[in-house]
Amino acid sequence: MIIILKNGASKESVDKLIASVQHHGVEAHTIVGSDTTVFGLVGDTSKVDIELLEQNEIVEAVRRVSEPYKLVNRKFHTADSEIGVGNALMGGKHFGVIAGPCSVESEEQIIEVAKRVKAAGATFLRGGAFKPRTSPYAFRGLKAEGLRLLLEAKKETGLPIVTELTSLTNIDLFNDVDVIQVGARNMQNFDMLWELGKCKKPILLKRGASCTVQDLLMSAEYIAAGGNEDIILCERGIRTFENATRNTLDLSCVPVLKAKTHLPVVVDPSHATGMASLVAPMAKAAVVSGADGLMLEVHNNPACALCDGMQSITPDTFESLMADVKRLCEFEGKI
């Protein structure tokens, strides 16, 4: 349920209204806009009398929200959310680019890639330290050492770090990580999502391979309900009957999500296609579809990569792609 207040309502009247609705066991979340103030009521609102609320002198309108996700719903928060880490912003008119290798392999590798992607315009550095792999025999990351190397790359470049948390048992190692990534495999790990709701840092939530848009939004709701609304959604391809690409990149979900939620939406064409040759065209299509950012795998020597070399682009290709992305962002009105 949403309560829209009239302009000029006194603090005393607002506090009295909040107390009256909280008496019914619901939580009132305040969203202050440039023109209006809105209360989002979360919980069992069946006992709240809409007609009585509408008669209150400071209430402009009362609306019910039918969708099961409330806090991440655009009806609760009409303006686009902007997620910031230092000078790096994503959402609204700010376009962000997260770039780096699938896995951190060495200090030389991660620092070289970090310098190259920053010079080309990346705003965040990605790199896997803990890697969930389908095969138990595949390279599963350098773990704590990988996080240390990411921090070294951050010192060299100033780029905020985005890296994946695969288990809550490792969360204490992520104190210096700027953005915690929840991978597709953990999108419905609800215990993890609830705990991440207590974090005071942004969460990048990847869509599961077999999950719907509503599934993704409900997972984001878990994080928001825990108290953390700094959430970035990521489309990284879904599983269909098509096998020409690694996954099927669902670009149609971008405008759908933008209509349903205020959260930023980024697209990962690297994991979606699994082919380096398809990354650039799909990245540019993502910009035009309305995405707020891109997540790209960049490796200085893809042929020798320990993880996902086939879908990694080179720093030179990334530099060329960023020139096109910048032109498209200017056309779309994003910084």
Image: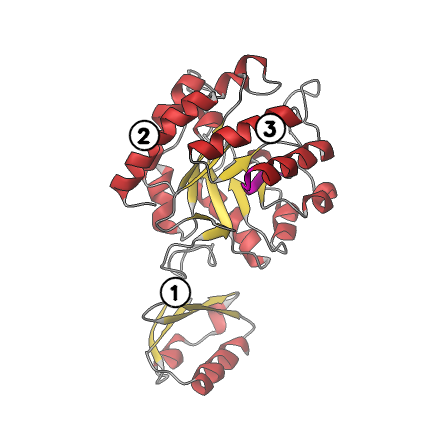
Would residue 239 be seen by someone viewing this image from the given angle? no
What residue lies at 40% left-to-right and 53% top-to-bottom? 262
- The answer to if 212 sits in the magenta stretch is no
Q: Secondary structure at mark 1?
A: loop
Number of other residues with Cα within 10 Å of mark 3, as a class: few under 14, some 14 to 19, many 20 or more: many
Q: Quick check: 330 left or right of 110?
A: left
> Label 1 is placed on what type of residue?
Arg
- Estimate the x, y position of residue 101 in percent, counting from the top left: 55, 27
Q: Earlier in the sequence, mark 1 or mark 2?
A: 1
Q: CA distance from mark 2 to mark 3?
A: 24 Å
Mark 1, other Cα within 10 Å: few <14 / some 14–19 / many ≥20: few
Provide the residue designation for mark 2.
324
Where is residue 95 drawn, in percent x and y?
A: 39, 43
Relative image position of residue 277 (x, y in whole percent): 40, 17
In the depicted view, which residue is nearer to us: 85 or 166?
Answer: 85
Q: Residue at x 68, y 48 (%)?
A: 175
Label 3 sits on what residue type?
Ile
Q: Position of residue 107 (x, y in %)?
A: 66, 27
Q: Point out which mark residue 64 bears.
A: 1
**Quadrant of the rendered structure where residue 168 is?**
top right
First in sequence: mark 3 or mark 1?
Answer: 1
